[in-house]
Image (cartoon, rainbow, N blue to C red):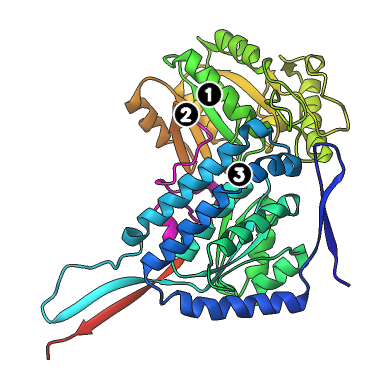
Amino acid sequence: MTSTIQLISPVDGRVYAERRCADAAQIDQALAAAEAAQAQWKRRPLSERAAFCSAAVDAMLAMKADIVPELAWQMGRPVRFGAGELRGFEERARHMIAIAPDALAALEPTPVAGFRRCIKREPLGTVLVVAPWNYPYLTAVNTIIPALMAGNSVILKHASQTLLVGERFAEAFRRANLPEGLFQNLLLSHLYTGAIIASGRVQQVNFTGSVDAGKAMEHAAVGRFLGVGLELGGKDPAYVRADANLEHAVENLVDGSFFNSGQSCCAVERIYVDEKIYPAFIERFAALTRQYVLGNPLDEATTLGPLVTPSAAEFVRGQIADALTHGARALIDPKDFPADAPGSAYLAPQVLVDVTHQMSVMREESFGPVVGVMPVADDDEAIALMNDSEFGLSASIWTQDLAAAEYLGDQIDTGTVFMNRCDYLDPALAWTGIKNSGRGVTLSRLGYENLTRAKSFHLRHEI
């Protein structure tokens, strides 16, 4: 019997959409179609691939009026911010299309008389993209567009919480007249996702999600000699030095902590502040946090929507309660946010002080609207605390000293170092993580290396 998946909206707890999962026969057909389509697609000139991909981006943007409220219903982001994800989607897609000719160009070593030598970039075959719900367009496009530009076919398995996003991608490529079978959206159970990975019929898996799910992906891929790109969790730190522009740091760190209700792998989840400016920082930080409006994400006045599920909110409530039990102090009164209701997905933002690294809220990924703030004596203490984590996705330094930021950044165990900004992916730079934040690279020209294989040509033409 074919199973179904229900999309339960965090807005009101009701079923927003329901779809049937793909069965074994449909999966087999999709894999065969992807293989056949890719064999022809890889022979098309890069300019033709770019034209199809650009048309798909245009088609997606044309659906903005429907996509924005759809996002709110599916995962809770306020409609006033919904268009921002599509702007980021476009920025990344256009950039990866534009740099493809250079990124995919043959590498030519120093010429040797009588020989033609070069290294070409060949497509891998079929790429499986397993995308999450929290930034459902941004995370998926990181791989989909460059994979197609590189000459691969793509199968998208989107999170069940945002299953309509997969359908939007399919519709965009349909409107762009992409060749049949080249991009396919499949609604898959965990069992069948693992079966596809273990089948040997996909050559690369790019996954964004939890650490445990990443381990399951690697387990399914054992012995198949395929690439597995993993963008997993984060517990991203920020360090505010004494010379920081305090107003700028507070404004951006509040946003970096609570945008999307903190449901971002690169959200700021712990902040270390030079003790000389610590009192002023926390006073301003808490004051700005109190200005959020928690409520229905379909209301234009709402600036903080619900978490994706009541259970996600309960996890964060548990972290906050545990920290308070062990001596932390809360700067925000949940009563100031009437929509906050225990047992619901609606959760007030929280700022915790008097925290330590013995508390879960400073060590385990929260993925919600809570942040802990600690004073530090100097750079050395800040770096030690920032590195005291099993994660390493991004970190930010807030200072007016460029040389100091780069020097300190060299000492932080992380994939990306920011100065005076946070929670942003520049498509010209490699997006990557270390430790339990994953492995592999998306975006930038390096992102193309994980979607292609090197093929050397050593041609002797003078005998």
**Which one is in front in this view, the residue at disc 3 or the one at disc 1?**
3
Label 3 neighbourhood size at 10 Å, few (<14), some (14-19), many (20+)?
some
Q: CA distance from mark 2 to mark 3?
A: 27 Å
Which of the image's four quarters has the C terminus? bottom left
Q: Main secondary structure of the magenta part?
A: loop
Q: Are marks 3 and 1 in contact (CB under 8 Å)?
A: no
Q: Residues within 10 Å of mark 2 (few under 14, many from 20)?
A: some
Mark number displayed over residue 64? 3
Residue at 73%, 63% in the rendered image = 187
Q: Secondary structure at mark 1?
A: helix
Q: Quadrant of the N terminus?
A: bottom right
Quick check: is 426 in the magenta stretch?
Answer: yes
The Cα–Cα distance between marks 1 and 2, rounded to whole angstroms, is 7 Å
Q: Which residues are magenta?
A: 421-450
Residue 34 vs 78, above or below: the answer is below
Nearer the observer, 246 or 329: 246
In reply to whether residue 451 is colored magenta, the answer given is no
Residue 122 percent coordinates (x, y)? 40, 73
Q: Quadrant of residue 205?
A: bottom right
* Amino acid at pointer 3: Lys
Name the residue carrying label 1: 252
Local secondary structure at mark 2: loop
Q: Position of residue 185 (x, y in %)?
A: 66, 64
Q: Is residue 423 above or below residue 191?
A: above
Residue 317, label in figure? none
> Can you identify the residue that label 2 sits on?
421
Where is residue 280 drawn, in percent x and y?
56, 8
Upstream in sequence: badge 1 or badge 2:
1
